[in-house]
Amino acid sequence: MHIAWLGKKSPFCGNVTYNRNITSALLERGYEVSFLHFAQEEAESDHWPHCQEVLLPFIYKSQVYTIPSLGSTNILRRSLQELQPDIVHASLTLSPLDFRLPEICRELNIPLVATFHPPFDSKLRNLKSSTQFLTYQLYAPFLAHYDGVIIFSRIQRDLLRRLGVPEKKLAVIPNGVDETKYCPAKSDLKSQFGAERLFVYQGRVSAEKNVESLLQAWKACGLGDESKLAIVGDGPLVNSLKPFYNENHGVIWLGFIPDERKRINILRAADVFILPSLVEGLSISLLEGMACGVACVATDAGADGEVLEDGAGVILNTNRVTTQLKTLLPLLKDHPELTRVLGKKARARVLERYTLNCNISHLEELYQQAVRRKSMQMM
């Protein structure tokens, strides 16, 4: 089967990680993949699978959304005509092209599926007053015209169903991680950081990730010189937070780390992984920490609470995150036996539900169903 994958390679975000992981796994299973993405020129990267690429021109591109150039729609249509794929999979990049895709693929008689990434708050506490809910409302009528829509959780499925997307088109296929790569192992980073207890946040440093609430709790607790908090990632709030939360408070700013092996080494050294987000989809970083056997703490934003339910981790409410962490951080610092147990449960949960291999098998089933339905419609 030939898959035309429409996604993104940059700037780095969860969508980019999803694109790389899934297309690599599909190629390993023998599929032909053509990668269509917004770029001015092809970028060399050892971390990406080698496959045919189609570059789509753009005016502006960020981690959140993309503004394509005027000619990008025609380039996309012409490219699909030439490639003649069996199916198009769009890892939606939040661009106007997302709304044109159903029409284009219908004209070309190509089945179309999408992965819908925008984060959300599972209980609509923060969502109704944010642009995220507007995004769901805006996209729902168009998603109804896709042949299949991949979401990450039951909660997200129910939300889109209430907004009018037919349930038969919604497929819950959670993110997955390679459990053979992300696994517990020895790491010497604790000694390099001068830490007996290492806490880690990994992700964007932006408002919706709520990193400042974690930093406020960390500073207020004063856990001592032997405890360190490593912040792995970059974002718009780094420069405003660094002066107030730094080495004097046991906070280590590591920035964005492109080398996957280094990120894995950090997770293996960690005692606790913390994700204080206000809105989420399903955090791949959280799954990576769990797979490495790290005790995990996350809010119940998006599907993250669903991932940690029934004792696989500690679930926080998105309201008053700082207050909750002030109570929790000293407990996790003083009870290593608790974090060891939580780490084992986190790893077991990933093996049970969130492996990349399982993810790809479900994706294959969705592809086959979409192709069969399109063939029947053309008869």
Image (spheres, rainbow, N blue to C red):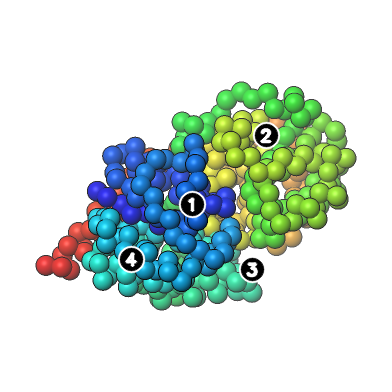
Q: Amino acid at mark 2?
A: Asp
Q: Amino acid at mark 1?
A: Glu
Local crowd at mark 1 within 10 Å, few (<14), some, or many (≥20)? few
Q: Looking at the image, is mark 1 or mark 3 nearer the viewer?
A: 1
In the picture, the disc for residue 126 is: 3
Question: Can residue 204 be seen from the camera position used here?
Answer: yes
Q: Nearer the viewer, residue 145 or 308?
A: 145
Quarter of the figure that contains the C terminus: bottom left
Q: Looking at the image, is mark 4 or mark 1 nearer the viewer?
A: 1
Q: Looking at the image, is mark 2 or mark 4 nearer the viewer?
A: 4
Q: Amino acid at mark 3?
A: Asn
Q: Residue at coordinates 74% horizontally, 60% vertically from top-left?
A: 320
Of helix, strand and loop, which one carries label 1?
Answer: loop
Question: Disc 3, disc 4: CB below 8 Å?
Answer: no
Image coordinates of residue 178 in percent, x first then y, are 46, 37
Residue at the extreme right: 248
Q: Nearer the viewer, residue 129 or 116?
A: 116
Give the residue pinned by disc 1.
Answer: 41
Question: Disc 2, disc 1: CB below 8 Å?
Answer: no
- Of mark 1 and mark 3, the one earlier in the sequence is 1
Give the residue pinned by disc 4.
Answer: 77
In whole angstroms, how far apart are the C-alphas of marks 3 and 4? Answer: 38 Å
In whole angstroms, how far apart are the C-alphas of marks 1 and 3? Answer: 38 Å
Q: Amino acid at mark 4?
A: Arg
- Of mark 2 and mark 1, the one earlier in the sequence is 1
Q: Residue at coordinates 56% horizontally, 29% vertically from top-left?
A: 184
Residue at the extreme left: 379
